[in-house]
Structure formats: C-alpha cells, structure tokens
Amino acid sequence: MNLEKYRAVIGLEVHAQLDTRAKFFCPEAVVYGAEPNTCISPVSLGYPGALPSINAACIDLAIKMGLATDCQIAESCHFARKNYFYPDLPKGYQITQDQTPICFGGKLEIRLKNGETKTIGITRIHLEEDAGKSLHDQDPFDTLVDLNRAGVGLIEIVSEPDIACAEEAAAYLTEIRKLVRYLGVCDGNMEEGSLRCDANISVMLKDATEFGTRVEVKNMNSISNVARAINYEIERQIQIVESGGKVQKETRTWDAATGKTFSMRDKESAADYRYFPEPDLQPLRISQKQIESIRAATPELPESRYRRYVGEWGLTDFDATVITERREFSDYFEAATLSGANKKAVANWMTGVVRAYLNETATDVAAFPIAPQTLGKVVEMVESGKINLNTAKEKLFVHLLERPDDDPEAVAVANDWLSVRDPEAERAQVRAVLDAHAEKVQQYRNGKTGLLGFFVGQAMKNLGAKADPKEINRIVTELLQS
Ligand code: ADP
Ligand code: MG
C-alpha cells in the first residue's frame, strides 16, 4: 500500500459537559454515578406543557471557552430543535444551536513533538443539551434507559478540517482538555464521558484539490484511542481507494478491544433532523459588558504560562509541559517559587518527587500535604548547600509528607541532616580521588569531560551523605583545571 501518495484530512467535534450545578433548562443537579433516574424533572423528562428556562451559567461558560480560543462571540443567537427519535431522548428533540452558534471563527495553537506549533481553526462552539444514556449491559434481555444525563448543558467545539494526522489530533484534544479544566468549563474526564470526541476523517491524493468523503468515528473514550481510531481509519480508507472502491459517508464506532472501527449507520444529513427555531426560548442577547466581565474573570491560560516558563523562567519544554498540564499543579509551582527559590530547581522537584508522589498515591495536588512555601524552603536549603539533595529528597521530604507543619530547617537540625562543611577535608578527599585515578584525569583533560561525575561520586562516597555535592563538584572542577 502506498501511503505516501495520500494525505489525511481530519476535523474534530468535541462535546464538553458544562460544570454547572443545574442542568441547562431545568434546575436539578446531576451527580456522576447517582442512582439511575434520580436526577430528573418534568422538563428533562419532556412532559407535555413543561417549559425550559435558561441556566445563565451555561452561557457564561460557553463564552469563556470562546474567548480562550479567540472566537468571535455572537451578539445575538437562538436555540433550535434538532428532531430525532431515540429512547434516551424523551422529548423527541434536542435543544441545540443550528444557524447561530454562540461562538465562531476561533483558533487554537497546538505544540507537536518536534517542537513545532500549528494553528487549528475552530469553526464554531455551540450550546446544546445532552441526551440520556441507553444501558445495554445491565439486563440480559432489555436495554435500560437512564435519564440523569438528559438536559445537562454541553458545548460542542467544532474544528476546521485542519488536522493532518493522529498526533495532531491528540495534541489538539490535549490542549482542549487543558483549557476546559483551567477555565472550570468541564472536568475533562473522557473515561466518564464528560469530554467526548467524534473524529471526521477522509483521505485524498496529495495533489488532489477536493477533499475525500468523510467518515465520522464515535465512541473513543481516551485521547490515545482517538489517535488509534484515526490511524486505523486512514489505512482502511486508503485501502478502499487503492483497490478502486469508494469510501461511504457514514458513522462508524470505535472498538478499543479489536482496534477497529465498525459501521453504525448512514450519516444523517441536516434535512433528517428538521431543524427549526425553538419556540419556547427567547433569542439570547449577549452584551459587550457581559463579555468583558467574563474576560476579566478568566485566569491566565496554560499556553501563556508555558511561554512564560520557557521564555522568562528558563524551564525546559518538558518541565513547562508537565507543570502547565493542570492549573492547580501550575499554581502550586508558582506559589513555591514566590519566596525566591530557584525556579528551575523548584520545577525539578515538581516534575520529579512531587509528581511521583501524586501518581503513586493517586492524590490530587489539592490534597498534597506539603504547603508550597514549605517546599520552596526545602529547595532553598538545597540550593544554598545547607542540605544535600539526596538527604532532602529521601529524608526531609518524606518527613514533611508525614508532618507537613514542621519547619524544614528545624527538622533537619533536629535530625542532624544538615551538610557539614569542612573545606579542608573536602579538598584533601578530592585530591586523593584525583591522585588515585591519574589515568582518568588524563582522559578528562583530553576531552572526556563526562568523567567529572565519576570524580564527584568517588569523593562523595568517601565523605558521606552530609557533604554537599555541588560544593564537591566545584572543588573537583577547580582542581582539574589547576
Ligand atoms: P456534522 O454534525 O454533520 O458532523 P459538523 O459541522 O458538526 O457536521 O462537523 C463536521 C466536522 O467534519 C468538522 O469538524 C469539519 O472540520 C470536518 N470535516 C468536514 N469535511 C471534512 C472532510 N472532507 N474530511 C474530514 N473532516 C471533514
Ligand atoms: Mg458530527
């Protein structure tokens, strides 16, 4: 198969469940995992005569996401009914937006593994309500319906077909998930379905001028599954075209177990849905004042933090990527640097021991026991040579996890963990190491500078954990140059 002849065209539709207490058009709260059919009301059940009323918090969250993705915000827009029959849609229609999305014409920058960035266009962000859930695996004979989710507010973020491969799709989704979490728009949880992605995929010859027929793939519950589904689908479509066939316009479902997509149904077209303006809701008017007050309340976005960390604070791409992944983690990092601790050193702690602890214990940074100021103090103690890095990580940090209110310096003194400086002994020890490895010293002087670590390691071994490796490093370098 000649993959080189083709290019893929991908556009993503991302649904994000809005993190509000009440549903979009009715007052009940939804708790994930609640008993089926306990978070419902006449409105969400579609009882005759029940009328919707708009939850303003949903509107604000959509605008927030629109501003964060450089969208224009509609001055006025209205809701529409999208009609279809499905057991988990009791009203027989979904309230959504058709001709007048609340946000449109935006963009999002993604960063790729090779360090390059790419801008993906955002066609529109519109508001709609979620449907209920059909449960196919709870009863041996029947499909059961849980309507807790019916009527929950959603935004649908539709991208331009600017995405060229699975890696770009994954980077785009990662960025969207980061944004909705920073903004408090959605919890971003793909496994629980609060963030869902449909991928539209087509292939075309590289020199063709028209896009190929697109297939829509649904039911991927993680970013890596979206990437896998896209790769599978690109190959499947190229195979069809190569063997002289035609790709069908259809909706397919992803099966993670087999790693394949399967046909679900023909792709509906707009006419099937018989869209018309929702008669029970007034058009929405959005004032400049409302937009400005939402803009003012928007926190610094992850991309801006990333740039600041790399550009001004000297962090690596890896540090900045890991730290800006979650807003709370990034907030913690900044708080730990406030007292003046070296930013790169704090970053190393964050991406190293702190992250390892959070992962191992499945703890959220909000529940991390050590206060950022305390961590900042520990980092400063290491930086100033008061305590050796290993002792700080393996003893002081572990102590503080258990007793976070203790003062790190006092703990180190009480346990006799502080580095002991004995400059004469240190110099003598380094000299002894260099004398004992004359051959290696020669190699070092001939350019094998990687041996520096070896000399430091040997000296540290003899001096014990209380010596400060940074100081030993300095002495070794000095003596090697003399
Ligand atoms: P629908 O609801 O019918 O799926 P939308 O407008 O909501 O339509 O979404 C269409 C998505 O498909 C967009 O993300 C768009 O970028 C993408 N798309 C359009 N044409 C193609 C194509 N030929 N190949 C791949 N993706 C496409
Ligand atoms: Mg679609």
Image (cartoon, helix red, strand yellow):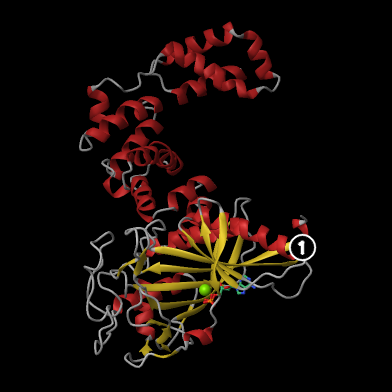
Quick check: which quadrant has ligand 1? bottom right
From the Cβ of disc 1, is ligand 1 less than 8 Å away? no
| Percent position of residue 2, x then y | 78, 56
| Percent position of residue 458, x then y | 51, 14
Please name the residue shown 48% across and 20% down the image.
472
| Percent position of residue 113, x then y | 60, 51
Dot 1: few (<14), some (14–19), or many (≥20) neighbours within 10 Å?
few
> Which residue is at the front of the view, 218 or 112?
218
Q: Quadrant of residue 280?
A: bottom left
Q: Is residue 340 left or right of residue 451?
A: left
Please name the residue shown 35% across and 32% down the image.
381
Looking at the rendering, in which quadrant would you find the N terminus? Answer: bottom right
Q: Amino acid at mark 1?
A: Ser
Looking at the rendering, in which quadrant would you find the C terminus? Answer: top right
Q: Is residue 466 left or right of residue 28?
A: right
Residue 48 higher or lower than 424, as above or below? below
> Which residue is at the front of the view, 105 or 90?
90
Q: Quadrant of residue 435?
A: top right
Instruction: Residue at the far front: name it.
Output: 141
Q: Is residue 147 left or right of residue 440?
A: left
Q: Identify the residue position indicated by label 1 in the image.
A: 243
- Please count the marks in the image: 1
Please name the residue shown 27% across and 85% down the image.
53
